[in-house]
Image: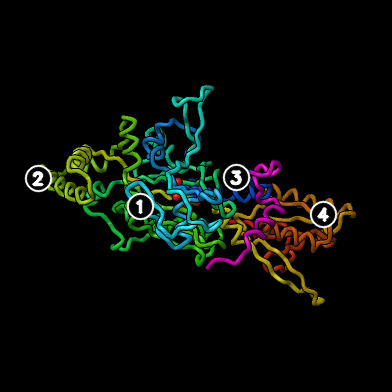
Amino acid sequence: MSKTIDMEVLASLCKRRGFIFQSSELYGGINGFWDYGPLGCELKRNVKDAWWKTMVRAREDVVGLEASIIMHPAIWKASGHADGFADPMVDCKECRKRFRADQLCEEQGLALIKNGSAFALPADAACPACGSKNLTEPRSFNLMFKTFVGPVEDESNLAWLRPETAQAIFAQFNNILATARQKVPFGVAQMGKSFRNEINPRNYTFRSREFEQMELEYFIRPDEAVKLICGRVATLADNPDLAGEPQADWGWEVWHRYWVEQRLAWYRAIGLPAADLNQHWQTGDELAHYARACVDIEYAFPFGVQELEGIAARSDFDLSQHQKHSGKQLDVFDEALKQAVDRLDADAKDHCTQRIVAAWTGRGKSGEEARAFAVKLYEGKYVPHVIEPSAGTDRLALALLCNAYDEETITDEKGKTDQRTVMRFHPAIAPIKLGVFPLVKNKPPLYAKAREIFAKLQRRWPCFWDESGAIGRRYRRMDEAGTPWCVTVDFQTLDDGTMTLRDRDSMKQVRLGISELIEKMDAEIG
Ligand code: GAP
């Protein structure tokens, strides 16, 4: 269920407290670009750190990559982006506004008409701004930002800003394989900026023109290789234990589902409630022609249930495309496969080839391709298949902001009511973990003690020192920043070393010594 938050109220808090600013605001802003302020950049960093920790550092089978944003333009030819990464665009001839044709139709409960690679508008489509039906026919608009490498601005120096981080992983596959001491199945993770010249940036930071992605390309054996090695291919019907250790006999379908479960568990672990997460399994036309399955993990934003991450089973499409376009081999040698194949006699190989040809031709591939694949397989080689969990960092930061936002009416001991705005972030992703306050600032021993405690805590976590205003006001400021705890150092601290720890959500206070405090925070931040 979507939370009922006015996005303008959230955007205003984000600006006021330094989470998100409009890019270039001083000059009137620039549509589709956003800056993260002091709190926002900490929030985003925590999101990325949490992702990297779970996806790379906590696993033995995933390594990282940090590639350049501008790459050889041939990469985008091979990937299909140069020719096919486009959205259909329409203009209103009356008010001159521009829209994405598919979004315009969807919002009006209509279906955009597809004729091969061309599009047409249904007769009832109207301009969302002025209501006119005088719209242009949809035209394809490539979303990649162009630039030129070097001083000469001609076609031979044309380059693109990457529209996704994924392609660099495929382009560097051989180098990673040669250096990382990994064997299939293994993954390569990358996070970083991507750029898309979106026709209609909208919903605050949700659809931006510059954004960050966190992508994993997880390389697996083709099912045919699994079958030869293990004698069987486990499917979902076998009820594999998806929370347990991956198994050698898993086919692509199980690996795909495993990553869906892993990613959902991670979203829950950083504080998104299970009830607000949705799985949208793409069907028919929604699926890219090479994809065997794709699930969108969606979050119930205040403006609708929308995609946070796509998890696609992309077969061997990407590596095969780069192999074809670069002329370099991107296959792997699999020792276990070679040993399994060496145990087969000629009849068994013939039988296996027939099975492969039947399955491949059933999927619309040629018999020749299938036989070439089988020949490689008998040498112990194949082009790995890939499962791709691809998430948007900014979208996730926005989901976490929406999820955290809360307003509540509180009543004090005297019965006086007040409204408080509180950002209920999970402690692991909260920008500041602890506010540290001296009760008063004009008592030197108390002040010095508070500074000493602050210095000790700040070495471990991002803390915020606040000595100005009444304690209640200092709490309120930390509530708006989403700080899970505040520590107040008072006169008793000078006597027995204990201080009050105030919890952001319950507003309850307890007295603790420094080592108890550190223990509690370690346990809760994780
Ligand atoms: N490599 C696959 C890929 O890029 P995608 O579904 O186009 O797939 C993956 O993008 C994720 O990147 C999306 O689920 C979304 O979170 C994020 N993303 C895509 N376009 C975006 C945009 N214009 N603004 C913000 N995030 C975006």
Q: How many labels does the image show?
A: 4
Q: What residue type is labelled 3?
A: Phe
Residue 423: x and y in percent read 66, 61
Q: Quadrant of residue 33?
A: top right
Question: How far apart are labels 2 and 1 at the CA level?
Answer: 47 Å
Q: Which of marks 4 and 3 is nearer the N terminus?
A: 3
Question: How far apart are labels 4 and 3 at the CA level?
Answer: 35 Å
Q: What residue type is labelled 4?
A: Glu
Q: Give the range drawn in magenta.
A: 1-29
Residue 381 appears anywhere in the view: yes
Residue 39: x and y in percent read 67, 50
At a point 51% along the width and 58% down the height, the residue shown is 267
Residue 347: mark:
2
Nearest to viewer (mark 1 / mark 4): 1
Q: Which amino acid does label 2 sit on?
A: Asp
Nearest to viewer (mark 2 / mark 3): 3
Residue 114: mark:
1
Q: Earlier in the sequence, mark 1 or mark 4?
A: 1
Q: Which of marks 2 and 4 is nearer the N terminus?
A: 2
Q: In which quarter of the image is residue 302?
A: bottom right
The answer to the question of whether label 2 and label 4 lie on touching residues, with beta carbons closer than 8 A, is no
Residue that badge 3 annotates? 33
Seen in the picture, residue 320 relative to 290 is either above or below; the reply is: above
Q: Earlier in the sequence, mark 2 or mark 1?
A: 1
Residue that badge 4 annotates? 467
Question: How far apart are labels 2 and 3 at the CA level?
Answer: 62 Å
Q: Does the beta carbon of the residue at mark 2 sit less than 8 Å from ligand 1?
A: no
Mark 2 secondary-structure assignment: helix
Question: How far apart are labels 1 and 4 at the CA level?
Answer: 63 Å
Identify which residue, 501 or 271, lies in the foreground. Answer: 271
